Image (cartoon, rainbow, N blue to C red):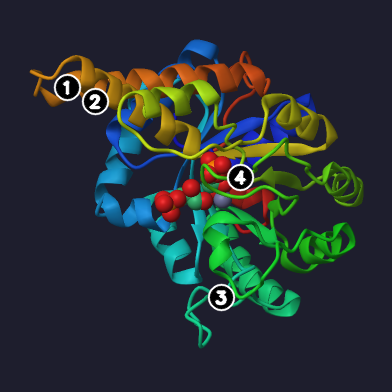
Amino acid sequence: MSLVPMKQILDEAMKAGYGVGAYNVNNMEQIQAIMKAAKETKSPVILQASKGALEYTSFVYIKHLVLAALEENPDVPMSMHLDHGPDLKTCKLAIELGFTSVMIDGSIDYGAKTPTGKHPARSFEDNIRVTKEAVDYAHRFGVTVEGELGTLGGIEDETQTDRVLLTDPNQAAEFVRKTGVDALALAIGTSHGAYKFKAAPKLAMDIIEKTHKNIPKTALVMHGSSSVPQELVEVINQYGGKLDKTMGVPIPSIQQAIKLGITKINVDTDGRLAFTGSLRKYLALNPKEFDQRKYLGEGRKGIYDVMKFKMVAFGTAGHSGDYKPMSLADMKRVYGAA
Ligand code: G3H
Ligand code: 13P
Ligand code: ZN
C-alpha cells in the first residue's frame, strides 16, 4: 500500500461518524508507538510533521521513517500531513518528500513581523489568496489541503492579535467556496501546548455545529486537542519535572465535538508528556542505566498507551479495513487534475 491522501481518510470518517487523530511526529520512537497503536486497534491514522519537525529530521529522515512505518504496517491506511505549513514553499517541499496532505496556515503571516516582533494575522482576503495558491498547487498532485480560519492560542499567541479570533461559520463557507480546501481548522477556543485552561474549558461547540451545517462536505479540524492527563503531569513532576497546574481538553468534550462535526483531531502535547514522564521515571529509578534503548523504549511505550486510548475514544478503532485505500493518482482524478 502507498500513503493515502488524507481527504479519503477524513471522507470515510465523516461518512461513518468517527474522528481520526492526527499525531505529531519528530522521531522513530513516536512513529513506532503510534503505528503499533493503530495496528492493534485497527485504526486508520494521520501522522503529521511541523516545519520544526522537518528541520529537526533534516527532511530526509522523516520521509524514510514514514516509509518504514508504511512498509511495516501494510494494513493500516495512513496519511502523512504537513502541520501548520507557513507558506507555499514549505508545502511544496512536503509534497516533494511524498506527503499526501499539507496544511497551509494562511491565518498568520509567518513571513512578516510587526515592530514588536510578532507575526501579524492575515486578513480574510489574504488568507483566501495564499490558501487558494496552495490548493491549486497541491491538487495537481492529488494532495489534500487543510486551511485555517481564525486564530488559536499557544504558538499563535505570537500573532499581533491580542485575543483569540474564533471562526465565523458564515465566513467559513465563503472561505471553502473560494479556496477549494478539503479540510478546515476551526478556532473554537483551544490552544496549543500544555497550558490551555486554568479551569474546566468552555469551547465554542456552536461554531462546530453551525460550520458543519454550512459546509457538510468539508472535514473540520480541531487543533490543540491534547487532554493533558493529570496522571502524566504528575509522573513528570514526581520525577523532577516542574510543570505548573494546567488543564487540557477533556475526552468527553472531544467526543461531543466529533458528534457535532469535527473529523480530524490534532494531538502533539500528550505524546510529549507521555514520553517525558516515562523517560524521567525510568532514569530516576535506574540511575546506573545508560543504554538509550532502555529509556527511549520506555518513552515509546508511554506514547503507545496514550495513543491507543485515544484511538478507541475518538471512535477510530476498528475502521482500518472499511475501505480500499486510494492513491494520489486516484485522487488526482477526483480533483479533475489527471
Ligand atoms: O501545532 C504545533 C505542533 O504542536 C507542532 O509543534 O512546531 O514545536 O513541532 P512544533
Ligand atoms: P496540542 O498542543 O494540544 O497537542 O495540539 C497540537 C496541534 O494542534 C498540532 O497542530
Ligand atoms: Zn495546530
Q: Distance between the residues labelled 1 and 4?
A: 33 Å
In the picture, residue 238 is in which quadrant?
top left
Q: Residue at x 28, y 33 (%)?
A: 28
Q: How far apart are marks 3 and 1 (CA)?
A: 41 Å
**Which disc, if any, is residue 293?**
1
Tell me the amino acid under the disc marked 4.
Answer: Lys
Query: Marks 2 and 3: CB-CB under 8 Å?
Result: no
In the image, residue 62 sits, relative to residue 115, either above or below, namely above
**Which disc, if any, is residue 196?**
4
Quadrant placement of the C terminus: bottom right
Decide: few, some or many residues near mark 2? Use Cα within 10 Å; few <14, some 14-19, many ≥20: some
- Comparing 69 with 274, the one in front is 274
Tell me the amino acid under the disc marked 3.
Answer: Asp
Of marks 2 and 4, which one's residue comes earlier in the chain? 4
Q: x and y percent of residue 56 in the render?
A: 28, 52
Q: Which residue is drawn at 52% across and 58% down?
A: 155
Q: Which residue is drawn at 32% across and 45% down?
A: 63
In the image, residue 195 sits, relative to residue 52, either above or below, namely above
Q: Label 2, on which residue?
A: 296
Decide: few, some or many residues near mark 4? Use Cα within 10 Å; few <14, some 14-19, many ≥20: many
Decide: few, some or many residues near mark 1? Use Cα within 10 Å; few <14, some 14-19, many ≥20: few
- Comparing 212 with 77, the one in front is 212
Query: Marks 1 and 2: CB-CB under 8 Å?
Result: yes
